[in-house]
Amino acid sequence: MKIDRRTFSEMLAGAGAMMIASPALAQSKTVEVSMKNSPKGAFVPATVNISVGDTVKWTNPGVITHTVTFDPAQAGTPSNVAAGAAPFGSGDMEEGDTFSHTFMVKGTYKYVCKFHEAMGMVGTVVVS
């Protein structure tokens, strides 16, 4: 099979772009947060520090329903999303459910379990 110079150059350029992009993609990580019920509801860890492009995965291992709510309109106390990011949330999470979100905007995100916020079930994601 013969390949002309232009096609070969385009193939090399594409391969080079993939090689440049691959390390950036490989550096993204997933941080896990668990929902605890005893002695009171809590996100563990309560604060996570990540970089843009990283993912946080929340898991509810218990039988009590929880939420991961990044929406000031649904929170009793001030919660927020970083400027430029839209509110989001997991909806109800039953035993064994997981919810993941990849953070693409720098800033501090405060979130709550809308059912247990009054008990102190709040968390923070700091994206740098």
Image: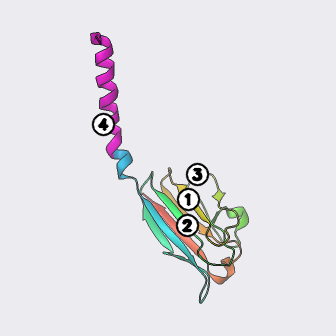
Between the residue at mark 3 and the residue at mark 4, the CA separation in whole angstroms equals 30 Å
Left/right placement of residue 121 relative to residue 32 reads right
Q: Residue at x 55, y 56 (%)?
A: 101
Number of residues whose C-alpha sits closer than 10 Å to that of mark 1, classed few (under 14), some (14–19) or many (20 or more): some
Mark 1 residue type: Ser
Mark 3 touches mark 4? (CB < 8 Å): no
Q: 56 and 110: which one is in front?
A: 56
Label placed on residue 58: 2
In magenta segment, residue 72: no
Mark 3 residue type: Ala
Which range of residues does the magenta coloring cover? 1-23
Mark 2 touches mark 1? (CB < 8 Å): yes
N-terminal label among 3 and 1? 3
Image quarter in which the C terminus is found: bottom left
Between the residue at mark 2 and the residue at mark 1, the CA separation in whole angstroms equals 6 Å
Image quarter in which the N terminus is found: top left
N-terminal label among 3 and 4? 4
Mark 4 touches mark 1? (CB < 8 Å): no
Q: 104 and 18: which one is in front?
A: 18
Between the residue at mark 2 and the residue at mark 4, the CA separation in whole angstroms equals 31 Å
In the image, which is nearer the foreground, mark 3 or mark 4?
Answer: 4
Q: Relative to 46, say whether 80 is above or below.
A: above
Q: Relative to 85, say whether 40 is above or below.
A: below
Residue 99 at what x, y percent from top left?
A: 59, 61
- Dividing the picture into quarters, in which one does residue 93 lie? bottom right
N-terminal label among 2 and 1? 2
Residue 4 at what x, y percent from top left?
A: 29, 9
Left/right placement of residue 75 relative to residue 103 reads right
- Dividing the picture into quarters, in which one does residue 98 lie? bottom right
Name the residue carrying label 1.
100
